[in-house]
Image (cartoon, grey):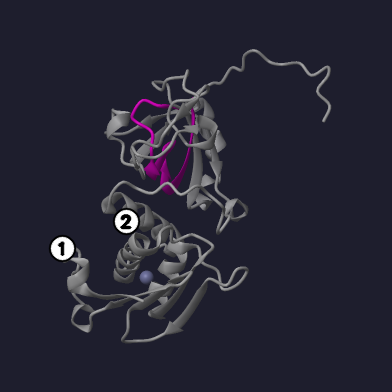
Amino acid sequence: MREGGIQKLSEIVLKPVGIVLSDYQDAQNMPIGGTPAVIQVYPEYQEALQGIEENSHVWILAWFHKAPRDLLKTSPKKVNPNLPEYGVFALRAYGRPNPVAMCLAQLDKVENGRLYLQGLDAIGGTPVIDIKPYYENDIVFSPDTPYIMGKNREIRQDLMFRHARVHHREECRDLHLAVRMAAIAEEYLGKVMSPELRVTVLGSLCLGDCIQGITRARLSNPPRFSFNLEPNIYQTIWVREEKTLNITLKPAYAEKEINTLSDQEVFHIELL
Ligand SMILES: [Zn+2]
């Protein structure tokens, strides 16, 4: 690659195109998956929004104006304080030399130069530097990523919930069941997105779809996923190396609210 004669720019000037309006004013309290928020696009840029309502999701690039800019290494403390350090270019860390925030948000509506969003992780007052549509081309169904395991069940389940929700596009009852089953499987067998972990689903189409969204397991290359449509069963079978884990919903709980009950109360869990 040719390097000689290329001029290194010492400064790049960005002009904010809008601002984030949100009840969240403190980055420390920002939930990991972001919050509902509004972007007010400034009048001189509103013409650039034409047609944006045809997209369900948009990339928001913002400038984290309060973030430290001298940070080169850190650990994902919010998710798990016991994890090792990474370079900030290997994480989505808040502090970095140029605190450009990149967030994929769901676009609910556009009205009077305002974008109404869900899942934005920027606080109120954050300058917005760009808005771009999210395309099918952006989707990589099962990328290789580091295993950043959440410090507790709540955080792990929350991440799985978001993966299932984005994939399945409705928050049905079987989505919650899939999240719960995958969280249990992770505790027994480790990372559920691992190429070494195979899963079989017996049950509804929604359960199968949500388990696929959480595990990113494909039917082949490598074959990690199989599915049998069974009207009255909710079962997932997880296989990793020599271990097989069966998780089956007890029939008595098929139509009941299970969130406040323990794993053992609701499921038959069998490790072979
Ligand atoms: Zn569903």
The residue that mark 1 highlights is: 260
Compare residues 42 and 63 and report the one nearer the observer. 63
Point out residue 32 in the picture as x, y percentages from the top left corner.
35, 42
Point out residue 202 in the picture as x, y percentages from the top left corner.
40, 81
- Asked which secondary structure carries label 2, the reply is helix
The residue that mark 2 highlights is: 157
Category of crowding for the residue at label 2, using alpha-carbon neighbours closer than 10 angstroms: few (below 14), some (14–19), many (at least 20): many
Residue at x 48%, y 69% (from the top left corner):
241
Q: Which mark is residue 95?
A: none
Q: Main secondary structure of the magenta part?
A: strand
Q: Is residue 102 magenta?
A: yes
Residue interval drawn in magenta: 99-127
Ligand 1 falls in quadrant: bottom left
Above or below for 226 versus 39: below
- Asked which secondary structure carries label 1, the reply is loop
Residue at x 83%, y 19% (from the top left corner):
4
Left or right placement of residue 236 versus residue 268 in this view: right
Q: Amino acid at mark 1?
A: Thr
Above or below for 37 versus 193: above
Point out residue 106 in the picture as x, y percentages from the top left corner.
43, 49
Residue 24: tell me if it is visible. no
Q: Find the distance from the CA under tag 1 to the CA under tag 2.
A: 14 Å
Q: Amino acid at mark 2?
A: Gln
